[in-house]
Each structure stands twice: as structure tokens, then as C-alpha cells.
Amino acid sequence: MVYTFSFEKLNVWLDSKELVVEIYKVTQNFPGEEKFGLTNQLRRASISIASNLAEGTSRNTGKDKAHFTTLSFSSLMEVLNQIIISKELNYISDSDYQNLRVQIEKISNKLNALRKSQLNN
């Protein structure tokens, strides 16, 4: 049996991992000239959400953990900004945009709750 690390048990990490998959799917349809622009930026920012959550679980203090949760939230806002721009450039459909917005809102609420609990420990 493979060991499960604490970050893998976080619902917000699971949700952020799902967001990464969705971002990769959506950006496959972006124009080729965006490969090193919005495509790359969106993918890197979305991965950063999950990665900072994973890294934060290895920290010892609640304050340190909360710092990485804050970094995850910042990356989430970067993704939101970039999908808004992508929508205005007609790179993503209305339905993909709405789906991503719903996922982002759900993750943001969970990140805020997690950060609050980390600061209270």
C-alpha cells in the first residue's frame, strides 16, 4: 500500500488538482501564438495553487502553513484574472468560463476557511 500524504487528504487540494486538469483541457484550444503566453501562464498559475498547498502541509507552524495557503489563494486570483482575459479574447467559451468561475469560487472559499483554521492553531 502506498502512503498517503496529508495534503492528498485535503478537499481543497483535490479541487485545485481538478482545476489544473480543466485548465490544461481548456488551454489546448488556445491559439498557437499563446503557447508561451496565456497558455503557459494559466497552466503554471493553476499548478502553483496545488503545489503551494502541498508545500504548506510540510511546515510546522500554523502561521507558516497559512503563508502557503495565502500563496495558493494568490495563484488562484492570477488564474481568475487570466481566464477573464482569455474570455475577452474569445479563447474560451461561455460554458468553460462559467465552469471555471464556479470551480474558482469553490476553491477560494475553501482556501479562506483553511487559512483561518491554520491561523487559529
Image (cartoon, rainbow, N blue to C red):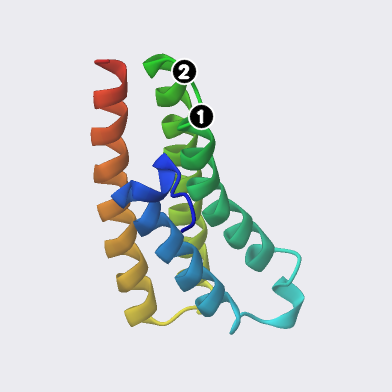
Residue where numbered disc 1 is placed: 58
Tell me what residue is drawn at x 45 percent, y 60 percent: 17
Above or below 33: residue 107: above
Above or below 65: residue 87: below
Q: Position of residue 25 (x, y in %)?
A: 52, 79
Q: Position of residue 52 (x, y in %)?
A: 52, 39
- Asked if one can make out residue 91 in the rendered structure from this viewpoint, the answer is no
Mark 2 Cα-neighbour bin, 10 Å: few <14, some 14–19, many ≥20? few
Along the line of sight, the residue nearer the viewer: 90 or 114: 114
Looking at the rendering, which quadrant does residue 103 occupy?
Answer: bottom left
SS class, disc 2: loop
The label number, if any, that marks residue 69 in the structure image:
none
Along the line of sight, the residue nearer the viewer: 57 or 111: 57
Tell me what residue is drawn at x 68 percent, y 63 percent: 40
Along the line of sight, the residue nearer the viewer: 32 or 20: 20
Above or below 1: residue 98: below
- Looking at the rendered structure, the number of numbered marks drawn on it comes to 2
Q: Amino acid at mark 1?
A: Ser
Mark 1 Cα-neighbour bin, 10 Å: few <14, some 14–19, many ≥20? few
In the image: residue 103, left or right of residue 38:
left
In the image: residue 30, left or right of residue 101:
right
- Asked if one can make out residue 52 in the rendered structure from this viewpoint, the answer is yes
Question: What quarter of the picture does the C terminus occupy?
Answer: top left
Dot 1 and dot 2 residues touching (CB under 8 Å): no
Residue where numbered disc 2 is placed: 60
Q: Amino acid at mark 2?
A: Asn
Q: Position of residue 14 (x, y in %)?
A: 37, 57
SS class, disc 1: loop
Above or below 7: residue 100: below
Looking at the rendering, which quadrant does residue 24 occupy?
Answer: bottom right
